Image (tube, rainbow, N blue to C red):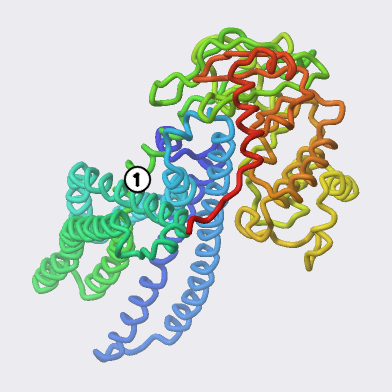
Amino acid sequence: MKRLRDYLFISDDGYKNLKKAIFACTITNMALFLPFIITTLFFGELIRGFIGIGLDWNKMWIIWGFGMISALLVFLSARNDYEKTYISSYKESKRTRFKIAEHLISLPMSFFNEKDLSDLTSNMMSDCSALESMLSSTIPPLIANFISVFLTCIILAFFEWRLAVLIFITIPISFIIVMMSKKNQKKIFEEHRDSKLELYSKIQEYLDGIKVIKSYGLGGKEFKKLDEALIYMKKMSIKVELIVGVFMSSASIILQAGIGITIYFGTKLLLKGEIDLLTLLIFLLISTRIYGPFLAILSQLYNLLNLDVVTERMNQLLSAPIMSGDIKEIKDLNIKAEHISFSYNDGYPVIQDISFEINEGKVFAFVGPSGSGKSTLMKLIARFWDTDDGEIYLGDKNIKELEQSEIMKNMSIVFQDIILFNDTIFNNIKIGNSEASREDIIRAAKLAQCEEFINRLPNKYETLLGENGSTLSGGERQRISIARSILKDAPIILLDEATSSLDPENEVLVQRAISELTKNKRVIVIAHKLNTIEEADKILVLNHGRIVEEGRHDELMERNGLYRKMYSLQRESMNYNITSID
């Protein structure tokens, strides 16, 4: 059973609940035999009346009384069965989803570069639902059915062992057929899973690009990749249903053949006078009760056979190595990089042998052409990825030895691409500090210049933002993000050019919000608008992943290098006008 626990990724409590569920299902199965036995006894007494022996009304009332008791026992056992199977499996499914979510937080960003979002979504939703179904509707009833059938056949053998064997013999044969097909079906299940993931990916791509599709007058049929993914998914679904259907139907036919076999040989025994009619009736009624649950289980064996594919995917996800580190305390917050290099999955070097140091109370800026490695360098400082070579230190500790939560506790990050949740403004700001009071949240919103547009909204702080803050402008979304960081009040601020795509009015407001955010903080900023970092204490100029210049603004301007060239080009672009040609 321990192997089953590990196989299904269930906790110790989940394992205990699974055993309780199997026991509860077994009790329910045994209780459900009572109505059949009482019905048989009832008809046996009626037959005695029809053949002239006479009805024993005292017996009839006793049978009726036992019938009422059996109905109550069936109800109580079924209720206990539901609590031990479905409710327990729902709780375990919730625990598994939280376990996956917590594991994802601990993984390096390189993992997410390799994984498709639709694949991870499928892990948390479809795969967890499949395991939930196994724990509630398949595994406990299946094991309980085998136990109850075995016990029932032993009891029946005391009355007539030959009929008991005939009832039982088709059950293992039908399940041998199912298990023999498992290996052949695994491949088709994997192909079916891959077709679903490919379809999810194309649907997401289609929805993400819907603006472009509409602007060029395209549609679903013209979006060839999505069309092909839908057709392939359809073919694979039909193939799975056909293959599974053949094996399941064969197993069902053999299983139900037990009824015909029991009738045939039971009738022969009756005609020979070796058994009486009541015994035959009992065996026939119980045989239908035995086969019924197994037929229901066979209809769900698709999920059981597909379980290998699901658990393999879950195992790959949960066994993915997390970002290690167990140091929970940092003495100081100086940042130092020593000869760091980094490349993404393609192996192309993005950062090459960079060293720098950021002292307390300084404004430090990264500048350079697009693709020079500025954003990557900032994410390495936050340990979204680990360096390939070299080390980064926070205080006197290597960040690879620090807990990720300890690093994030000391850093607030404002990215250019803002992520907001489909929740209220209040809850989106509260993400910065879950323990903050309402007064603290409102104060942070005011400092971030959010108060004016929040008060214009119908429900103010309780206004739902829509998916990724779709109801707000870019500047308003940016200010909500800054309010989060103000509420967090971390000593290190990372700014990934928060004003590069804003209109002048919003840019002024965001700059004011940033001024409040960066008071008495250590600031690292990626700057595209070089005039915004003229007062920085140190500017690092990157090109092709290397540091080509460093110093203050005035020093870099005197060197007549890449920084001065970029600065001059930006000054020229400010005077650029779009003109029409007649």
At label 1, which amino acid type do we have?
A: Leu
Answer above or below: position of 79 versus 473.
below
Q: Nearer the viewer, residue 21 or 93?
A: 93
Q: Residue at x 65, y 23 (%)?
A: 366
Residue reaching furthest to the front:
582
Badge 1 element: helix
From the viewer's perspective, is 394 left or right of 312?
A: right
From the viewer's perspective, is 78 left or right of 466?
A: left
Q: Nearer the viewer, residue 389 or 373?
A: 373
Q: Nearer the viewer, residue 279 or 466?
A: 466
From the viewer's perspective, is 377 left or right of 56?
A: right
Q: Position of residue 38 (x, y in %)?
A: 39, 74
Q: Residue at x 41, y 72 (%)?
A: 35
Q: Residue at x 62, y 13 (%)?
A: 549
Answer above or below: position of 9 versus 347.
below
Q: Position of residue 42 (x, y in %)?
A: 37, 80
Q: Position of residue 341 (x, y in %)?
A: 51, 14
Q: Which residue is mark 1?
A: 307
Answer above or below: position of 545 versus 98.
above
Image quadrant in which the N terminus is located: top left
